[in-house]
Amino acid sequence: MGSALKIKRPLTHNIYKKDFPLLHDTHPQLHYLDNAATTHKPQSVIDAIVDAYSQTYGPIHRGLYPLAEAATAAYEEARETLAHFIGAASSKELIFTRSATEAINLVAQGWARPRLREGDCIWVTRMEHHSNFLPWQRICSQKGADLKIVELKEDGMLDWESAEGLFDRPTRLIVLTQVSNVLGVENPVRAICAKAQQAGIPVLVDGAQAVGHQPVNVRELDCDFFTFSGHKMYGPTGIGALYGKIERLEEMEPLLLGGGIVDQVDDRHFTLGSIPERFEAGSPNLAGAIGFAAAANYLLEIGLAQVHTQVSQLSRAALDALSQCPDIRLLPGRNTQRHTIISFIVDGIHPHDLAQIAGEAGVAIRAGHHCCQPLMNTLGLNGTARLSLGLYNDAADVDALLLALDQARRLIG
């Protein structure tokens, strides 16, 4: 059945794939459709990382000689680039972390924990990734607070209207993903932030699946905290970022204590340094920051609106092709608008079997619970297959998946 289907080709030749050496040169036959897990790196990012180690490397904020000063300047320039990339008012509002996960934990332990009291509430959503669920589950348990969950409607969108007490006084924080890593739906972040602001409730947004795929402006969203990571937007692994409104960062304690974050230390006391350095204990990841900024510059040169249009068109075409297969169940459904991510189940074929067969045919997709077990439990599933699209994908990649689906049907029946 799948071999008879061909995607309606909104993109027949991808001009950007040549920028990614792993896909263009090393593995030209690979159809990589696992971009929600991690993205590949363009040559400009790889070159920036190499240059960081071969030309600019030195201690950050610690040396008075020219090489150290050049390294510090490059690090702070990367911060400026990424602050601009997400529309922050100042580079002081952007903190480098090891990942979006660490950024979320920094807010949980450094901002929420000191002010959370017994009987308070933190609201999360049913579609959160474990990295934006477990920190809040733990802190509520530790502090005797209530973890409340915004549930789903039948179309997979969040049922905000039924979240009784969401904007009431016991709520100390609202936490939500901008784009679900399973369902692909985008949440009405700006509207939620506007209502929360009226009630005096801070909002944290997990932007890992949005940044790099569409324009994002944190001032327009008016969120209090925003987290994202480098490796999901064509940058390096091991680095992420936390945006926080400056007044929120002033209220926050560091997650880690150590070198680089203090002004004065004596036997009994210490005085924290300025923001954002007070939250970046230890030796900073210079090459990671430079590579992260290079990824942002790469996307800015293309234009994030162009990236969003291109990937959205391919996503709609892929969704149309899969919806023609009567043995495929799309989650949450064909008519729900989604971005870059499509989860589905094929009748009679376990998602892990499907992913393995597809992988042997050169098609990389994801299978499992996608670090969203609370969501899977609600859906009554153990897992799904998931394709997620990126800048370098084209119709041939989705055609290859359709052929792999046919191969799985033949092998498993």
Image: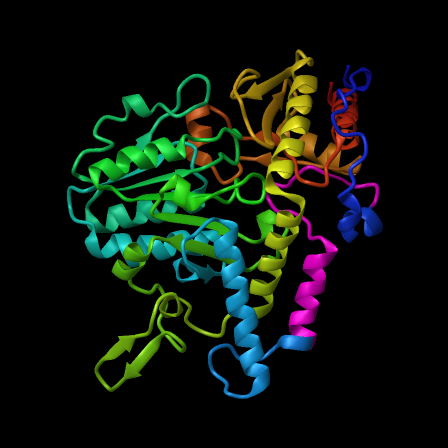
Compared with residue 375, is residue 410 higher up or lower down, i.e. above or below? above
Residue bounds of the magenta highlight: 28-54
Residue in view at x 78 percent, y 47 percent: 23
Compared with residue 402, is residue 112 higher up or lower down, i.e. above or below? below
Compared with residue 259, is residue 245 higher up or lower down, i.e. above or below? above
**Residue 348 lies within the magenta run:** no
Circle count: 0
Q: Position of residue 244 (x, y in %)?
A: 36, 53
Compared with residue 111, is residue 312 higher up or lower down, i.e. above or below? above
Q: Where, quadrant-wise, is the C terminus in this rendering? A: top right
Please tell me in which quadrant of the rendered image residue 253 appears. Answer: bottom left
Q: Position of residue 356 (x, y in %)?
A: 71, 36
**Residue 51 lies within the magenta run:** yes
Residue 278 can be seen in this image: yes
Looking at the image, which is closer to me, 192 or 236? 192
Horizontally, residue 56 falls left or right of residue 153, namely right
Q: Position of residue 4 (x, y in %)?
A: 81, 15
Looking at the image, which is closer to me, 239 or 14? 14
Q: Position of residue 297 (x, y in %)?
A: 62, 54
Residue in view at x 59 percent, y 44 percent: 37
Residue in view at x 29 percent, y 22 percent: 161
Horizontally, residue 413 falls left or right of residue 138, namely right
Residue in view at x 58 percent, y 20 percent: 330
